[in-house]
Image (cartoon, rainbow, N blue to C red):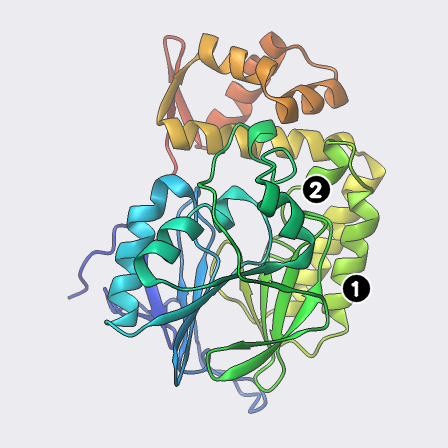
Amino acid sequence: MESECVGICTIEDGVCVGCGRRVYGEEVEDTMTTQTLPQGMVVLQRGWLSSNSVLLRGKEGWTLVDSGYVTKAGETLALLDAAVGGEPVVRLVNTHSHSDHLGGNAAVARRFGCPIWVPEGLADPIGRWDEAALLLSNAGQQAEPFSYSATIAAGDTVPMGEWEWRAVSVPGHDMHALAYFEPSHGVLISGDALWEDGFGILFPSLLGQADAIAAAREALAAIERLPVRWVIPGHGAPFRDVAGALQRAWGRLEAFAADPRRIARNALRACVTFTLLERGRMEEDELRATLAGVELFQRALDWIELTPDEAVRWLGDELERAGAIRRNEGRWQAMLPA
């Protein structure tokens, strides 16, 4: 009988080591496609507030890719302790700057004494701890400051576990984002550049920083050129239907290009859900003030020409219909796993 994992599985070779549930790895006829991820590649799937974390085992110890959200740092450490079994974590590597990917960096570094490697484009904002450049203060989110030991540039070879991974530039969601590709098994750690059903919010366009649509086209084209057989995304389960995921991502991107207001609506739905999950519940007056006071929300409302009052009504209907919230006498309750 399976034990409970409270919605969070620690996955190795396609099976949760806690509950025994097989998450992926159905049999395939193509002998060139691995049935499961290689032994020593462990995916820690998380709830909404934290990205997936990836553990890669080598002779000297484990490399961790991405550390989750700051308020979930205790959960992250507990998952890591269970997964590594007392073996050392020798480095922490980030895919990009956002709070759900690097929020636990400081806590992990304290616990394991490991150095942190970041994409080279993040060196300056992390060094100065520029919370706007890191999409923290201007998105109403948080992370604990940390120091990095090394930077990674596109094209670099990065030792993680027993494999050599190539850093691949995947801008769009974050203009400095990197994915990591392991060629011998065709595994891509994609961050938020490619999910099974799309990709991350195109924040740089919304914030007036860069043309994120053009950048995301570059990222998808770069992934298409790689002989990828497995994708470990920043959110969701690992998957092998890379062609299907890319087709869906291209379709989503072209829909954004045809009507850029979709970017703003997507950002509002996702980021308001994130805020609600962090706080648990909010009064409508509090939400209205948050929409009016956070730069990301202000810009999104300007794009779709809604006032905070109008946005509260629209978002309430949208998120309740999706099952993300429940409303009761002006109070919004988050319904998704955090």
Q: Which residue is at 36% across, 50% downward?
A: 107
Q: Are marks 2 and 1 in contact (CB under 8 Å)?
A: no
Q: Nearer the viewer, residue 227 or 61?
A: 61
Crowding near the residue tagged with mark 2, few <14, some 14–19, many ≥20 C-alpha atoms within 10 Å: many
Is 194 drawn above or below residue 269 in the view shown? below
Q: Is residue 133 left or right of residue 16?
A: right
Callout 1 amino acid: Ala
Write down the residue under mark 1. 221
**Cα separation between marks 2 and 1:** 16 Å
Where is residue 188, by image quadrant? bottom right
Q: Is residue 237 left or right of residue 152?
A: left
Is 89 drawn above or below residue 297 in the view shown? below
Q: Which residue is at 72% across, 60% downward?
A: 247
Q: Is residue 7 visible?
A: no
**Residue 319, image x and y in percent?**
50, 27
Callout 2 amino acid: Leu
**Residue 216, image x and y in percent?**
76, 52
- Tell me the quadrant of the picture where the N terminus can be found: bottom left
Q: Secondary structure at mark 1?
A: helix
Write down the residue under mark 2. 202
**Disc with the residue nearer the chain's start (2 vs 1):** 2
**Residue 27, image x and y in percent?**
45, 82
